Image: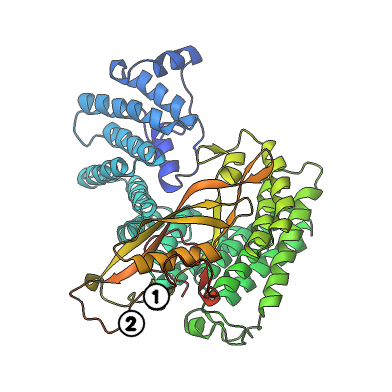
Amino acid sequence: MPDEAAPGTAADVAATAALTPEIVPAKAATPPSDTVVDAVTQPPATLGAPDAFSAFRSHFDAGRYAAAVPYAQRVLEVAEREAPTSDAEEVQVALMNLAMTQYLAADHTAAETSYLRAIALVEGSGRPLHARLARAYAGLASSYHDTDRHELAVSNFEQAVALTRRHEGVLTDQQLPLLEKYVDSLTELGRLEDALRGQRYILRVAARKHGENSVEFAPTLEKIGRWYARVGAYEQARRLLKRSIDLVETLDGPMSPRLLGPLATLAACDRKQLLDPTQHPSPDSDTDRAPLFGDPGAVAPSYSPAMLVSEAEKALARAVAIAEARPDASPSQVADVRTQLGDWYQGRGQPERALPNYQAAWVAAARVPQVQVHGRTLHEALFGQPVLLQVVRPDGWNRYSGRPPEQVEIRNVQLEFTVSARGRVETVKVIDDTGDPRRADKTAYTVEQTARYRPRMAGGEPVATERVTYSQPWIVLLTDAPDDSNSATKDAPPAGSTGTRPPPATEAVPPDKRTAPASTSG
């Protein structure tokens, strides 16, 4: 069996992927190609350990994680049969490889089971290897994070970070992938003070690694700026993003492709602030968040909606110019920034200005058919289906969000409709009204009036798409809970209404990836 200390072995695969599971590790030395081909075409149960491992690595290195799992299981079976003890080194290594492969194959239930077993084996061995234990906790935490079990993710990330610091040092950059997901889980739980401390630590580690005046430091500023925007601290986000832009401009030039990220993120920050119902054009628009995020020595400028619109549009237009100016312009980058500029105009209700950008993105994406995004080509990912850009949440959907969990439940109104070639919602049909037709009518009304989609495209032209579904969560008071609020469906439009009154524009929010209504952005 391979030794964990040897570079490029199965243990090296686990070491890399458990800490940073999105990075495929370097390939190990493998038997001659004819041996590998024979192995990968044979049933795993017929293979010995060397052939099973070769087949595993062949599938793994090609990104065929689901296909690699049975061979990783076979390696583990052989190791368990031949090892002198149940917690022997080769069993731990094989189990870690299996867990990591299951995680990458998105079988999080199986990965959780394997990682828990690996942790028990390592801790019970009497000679625990801290580096391996850190990887196991990191993999387990990542599985919890990716399945929105953030309480469990946080506790396991804390274990992984503590072990990594003990093994690699307090400011090791090995912990950065862990810290980023850890902060994300804390943010999902609404623990913003803890998340902010995590971001400051990330900044400290990155500054130590790259230096605060290096172009490599700019992406960290951009990531933390994106997080500030996510939690509604827009002025703080803008300061970090502009600092990132200034750093790149100074050190890499005003047409550097490194500017694409912070420019697009700045535009996204402006757009989110424009859609945030808690924001008003006043000098103290961020006062509610000032005690947590504010810089006492900084003077926060006032941004009017017109200023935000101008800044965002200029940032995206500049990103497009940078992406397209290079002789060796990357088609994927062009497709990305053109799509974002199109989304900006589409969200502003200007589909005639969005269309040329979508068509330019369509042409660019066609030049990179090999790019895969979650198993799809770039073409399919961008334009294969309508993409929801923004929508209005109906009044009262989260009226009972402050109640104890045992007094409320979440019910989801389900809609089905057509998205037109102009990205608007038509012919809305209620699929599930959650037992309250007026609640469903209210949801249908707001979606029909305010949703903006990037339309599906075929042959470079936008087309209508039928049977698009949408789910709107409502926090509903249980029947045995005291009701001291107005009905959640008060003032709903009459059934069948299609625009008899203006939509509640102050409730506009970007779509959230969560179905639960716990939001950290106010």
Q: Residue at x 70, y 64 (%)?
A: 245
Instruction: Name the residue beneath numbered marker 1.
Output: 396
Going by the image, does 511 lie left or right of 44?
Answer: right
Q: Is residue 261 left or right of residue 477?
A: right
Query: Which residue is label 2 attached to?
Result: 486
Q: Is residue 191 visible?
A: yes
Residue 455 coordinates in the image, percent (x, y): 60, 50
Q: Nearer the viewer, residue 134 or 280?
A: 280
Do tag 2 and tag 1 residues touch (Cβ < 8 Å)?
A: yes
Report if residue 1 is visible in the image.
no
Residue 242: image quadrant is bottom right
Residue 174: where, in percent of width, then height? 47, 52
Residue type at mark 2 is Asn
Quarter of the figure that contains the N terminus: top left
Dot 2 or dot 1, earlier in sequence: 1
Local SS, label 2: loop
**Residue flagged by tag 1: what amino acid is it?**
Gly
Q: Quadrant of residue 432?
A: bottom left
**Which quadrant holds residue 352?**
bottom right
Q: Nearer the viewer, residue 177 or 207?
A: 177
Is 176 on the left or on the right of 150, as rendered?
Answer: right
Q: Residue at the spot x=60%, y=41% of the render?
A: 378
The x, y position of residue 120, in whole percent, is: 22, 46
